Amino acid sequence: MATSPHHGPDVRDLLAQPSPSPEARPLSVTDLFSIGIGPSSSHTVGPMKAAESFARELVGAGRAVARVEVELYGSLGATGRGHGTDKAVTWGLAGYHPRTCPAGVIATLVEDVAASGQLRVGGRIAVPFDITRDIHFLPRTVLPQHVNALRIVARDGGGGVVLERVYFSVGGGFVTRLEGDGAAARQVPLPAVDDGPAAVARVPHPFSCGVELLARCADAGLGVGDLVRANEEAMRPRVELDDRLDAIWRAMDECIAAGLEGDGELPGGLRVPRRAGRLHHDLRHRDADVALGARPDPLAVLDWVNLFALAVNEENAAGHRVVTAPTNGAAGVIPAVLKYYLTFVPGAGPAGVRRFLLAATAVGAIIKTNASIAGAEVGCQGEVGSASAMAAAGLAEVMGGTAAQVENAAEIAMEHNLGLTCDPIGGLVQIPCIERNAVAAVKSINAARIAMWGDGTHTVSLDAVVETMRQTGRDMMSKYKETSQGGLAVNVVEC
Ligand code: SF4
């Protein structure tokens, strides 16, 4: 394939390529934005989906089961306690999926299991279960396929294996399952319950990288948001797509509202105070003072953006419902920028929210396809960096940006998140994660505004910066990739 002077494949080559096969459907808006449970998409949502899938398969097998055991490897073993991986696996084994699990189950199921000593797998198969005896944290065991791995085994009364599965939580709530043995072993995506499009489809404007996205936009005469919409509408009817987009924003907005009501401390033992409620109170009083004639603070809008992000990430850290965007640790960036758009940008409205999410989807899909959105694979640059790039693209789109300006906005945001490590103190998604989302949200707005000053012409392409992020993540020592063995995690004394 020919190479263009701006670091990517030649546009003519790309346009000559056929659409991917129907089986290889592009990443959809519902892949990048799924309603789940905090605090971590890879360490909470993914393992819960894996366990729920295991439970469904076990119930389907219809065989007698005496015991179920779980082993959490690598990063899941290292920081799983702080991320609630053991609880998530228990909820999943009980048959609950993160998208639909009732709040009451989240609040009480683990305690109920501890009290009774029994778990109903898939809601049907009663087995003795002790979360401290039957879930094993094995941080020193790292499977060759992926650092976030878990094995679930069901045994009969004689100790024989009834069902054994190995899963990988590969970031953003995506899960694969190991199929086959030895050299023939391969990872296959977990069959979706209902997160993704109902059916795979051939899309009119396939793209897998930034230069291809721009080429498809130019070829079709569409902006990024409209191009992604056309692809999405090949996978589901327009009405259903808009319902999904609206539901995503509604869940984000409800999460912000819940976070603004929060007070007290976050769980986990770090004694991190929830700040959003207090900050909200102060900002409303300051606005009231301005209305009465006090001198306005020209940077007050930054405080509001910070507030929106803190609210979401405190909800996530509390283990409440959030929208994975594209991960739970980075769940505050996009809602904060969307809320900024709706609150402070003239002419904002629901149609703009949909366009924002569609443009952000394009960038998230490019990053996940060519690098990673998992902190355990590439550090925080893949989580908060990706969310920041997606948010910048979405904001540039609704500010009237051309495809080139949208791509430029994403590139600027990602470029200035390169190298971010993942070093959560105590394995909890609290420090530095919560403030990091607030800082990244402001950075996204800045990136979009810088991009809108220009005409989209720039030196570093989105593809080049995504590849740089991948390489930087590959070279990053594992102690900086969601293991809590480096950085802030070892330099701050836990009280
Ligand atoms: S430091 Fe970043 S990647 Fe790591 S848990 Fe926190 S938000 Fe996620």
Image (cartoon, rainbow, N blue to C red):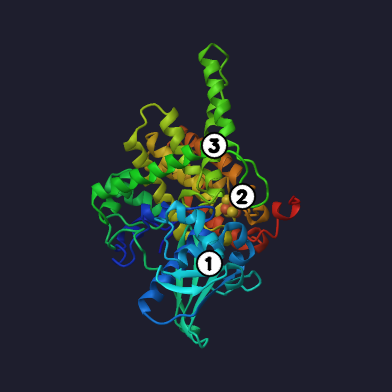
Q: Can you tell me whether the CB of the residue at mark 1 lies under 8 Å from the nearest atom of ligand 1?
A: no
Choose between 18 and 38: the one closer to the eye. Answer: 38
SS at mark 1? helix
Q: Residues within 10 Å of mark 3 (few under 14, many from 20)?
A: many
Residue 223 placed where, x, y %? 33, 43
Residue 122 placed where, x, y %? 41, 69
| Nearer the camera: disc 2 or disc 3 | 2
Q: Which residue is mark 2?
A: 267
Asked whether the beta carbons under mark 3 and mark 1 sit within 8 Å of each other, the answer is: no
Relative to 23, residue 287 above or below:
above
Residue 442's label in the rendered image is 3
Residue at (30, 52) in percent of width and height: 232
> What type is the residue that disc 2 sits on?
Pro
| Nearer the camera: disc 3 or disc 1 | 1
Q: Quadrant of the N terminus?
A: bottom left
SS at mark 3? helix
Q: Is residue 149 left or right of residue 253?
A: right
Q: Which residue is mark 1?
A: 116
> What type is the residue that disc 3 sits on?
Val
Choose between 334 and 398: the one closer to the eye. Answer: 334
